[in-house]
Amino acid sequence: MGTTRRKKAKEKVRRYKGKQVQKRRRQSKRAKKQAAKRKVRRNALFARIQKGWVRFSGFLKKKKDQLLHLCSRFPRFWHRGNMDIVQDPGEGCSHWAGQLNIRPGQQIAQESRTLPTSRKCKATVPLTVEKFTFHSLLGKGGFGKVMLATDAIRNERVAVKILKKRALLKSIKKRPSIDPQDILVESQVLQLANESNFLIHGNAAFHTENYLYCVMELADGGDLAHFWDENLLDLTTLKFIAAELVCGLQFMHSRGIIHRDLKLGNVLLTKEGHVKITDFGLSLLNAYGETNATVLGGTPGYMAPEIITRQSYNAAVDWFAFGVMLYLLALRKYPFTGENRAEIFLNILTQIPTYSGLDDRVTEDFISKLLIKNQSCRYGVNGNVRKHRFFSSINWKKIETGKAASPVKPHKNSMDADEKQQIPAPNSEALKKPIAAKNQSIFNNIQFVGPKWSETYHNVPMEEDPISPEDYGLLEACLELC
């Protein structure tokens, strides 16, 4: 009995030790797995911190000039950090000039407390997307959108046209016969537009890795299409609108620009009731006299017959579209209608518009001369538009100043409420594959700063796109860890 009892006790001890060994092995495996997971998490955290720090450093680098500009507004801080700011003669942006050599206990001379001589010149800051606060969407197109924004330094409301580079490059790829610079013609026209009172002025244009930004003056009276839809125009108002459009068209044609997409929706109104021609994305440059252009472009219903038949055309296409606009404003209907695009084109080529409902024969004569099918006989190219009896009551000198009293009364501006809201800068393209350098070179000549804004901003090379909200969250996490 004693032997059996001892055997059973030994067996019990052996099983217990075996279970303990297995338990320790399981715990060891679990501990190794947990340690491996902790290592992976730690490495991922370090990688995120490093990535966040790199982006944060880049963000601070981009903001450097803006911070310097803000500091320059508080002269009492100039010598507190033993540093000075001078103006860079190359780019016009501010940078650190180094420390002042002041011995311990030495008093700063009274003269040194005054601002540096270079501060008398107004320094400019780099123009980047961070300088704008976006409020609302004003319009949308095939390549991008137009947004209401306010710039940080001038505190001026502007319209910013944001175009996606990938969409533009795709359009260029589909039409290899077209010069890529023709797609980017809008920025060139916006620069010239500053010389006319009847074209939307271009304040600036710049680009980032994925977007083009065209900054334009804001015409906050809405577009002519909306105004026409809600108001009946009398003859005086019609003549005033027509006269200002004539001034705008003649200015463009004198600079070799054909708009090619003139319509009610592309004519904006200021709050004073003056017209502003906009949307120069389809414009042709250096188009003096006859051109070799045969590209189909524009809006159905406004296209001249020579565009539809793919003949060589000139500035007469704008005068035809101008005639369609006046017909719409006077008779509240289109001169050429149809159920589809093909039917509209056929009617433009074959039909003669009717003027039933228009009592004024002078207006009928003027519009009919603009809608002549033969471009060489069309009014505007053949004959002086300003001398027609339709404009007998117009004082052209007063009109050209842009300060003539306007009979157009736009509706109360509804954009004031939009200023209270803020939306982030576009970044939907930021996570996509980078655009190749050879394709980026197409956009090198797009940037400019207009004469009005050159006192505040200057051009910079292509910038990286704004940091996305996700990146800001990553930076906050990094700062908490620090």
Image: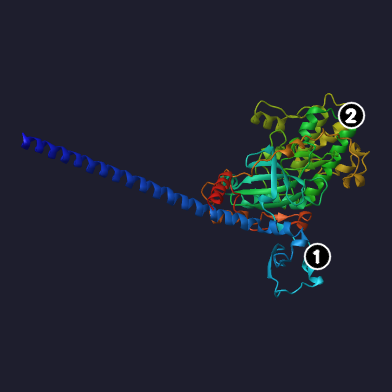
| Picture quadrant where residue 386 is located | top right
Q: Give the amino acid type for the residue marked by disc 1 in the picture.
A: Lys
| Picture quadrant where residue 417 is located | top right
Q: In x, y percent, where is residue 285? A: 71, 51
The numbered mark at residue 360 is 2
The numbered mark at residue 224 is none
The numbered mark at residue 120 is 1
| Picture quadrant where residue 97 is located | bottom right
Question: Which residue is rendered at x = 93% and y = 43% of the image?
Answer: 395
Residue at the limit of the structure toward the front, as seen here: 2
Residue 287 shows in this picture: no
Q: Give the amino acid type for the residue marked by disc 2 in the picture.
A: Asp
Q: Nearer the viewer, residue 374 or 453?
A: 453
Q: In x, y percent, where is residue 219? A: 78, 41
Q: Secondary structure at mark 2?
A: loop
Answer few, some or many: residues within 10 Å of disc 2's Cα (few below 14, many 20 plus, some between 14 and 19): few
Distance Cα–Cα, label 1 vs label 2: 61 Å
Q: In x, y percent, where is residue 165? A: 60, 48
Question: Which residue is rendered at x = 77% and y = 27% of the image?
Answer: 333
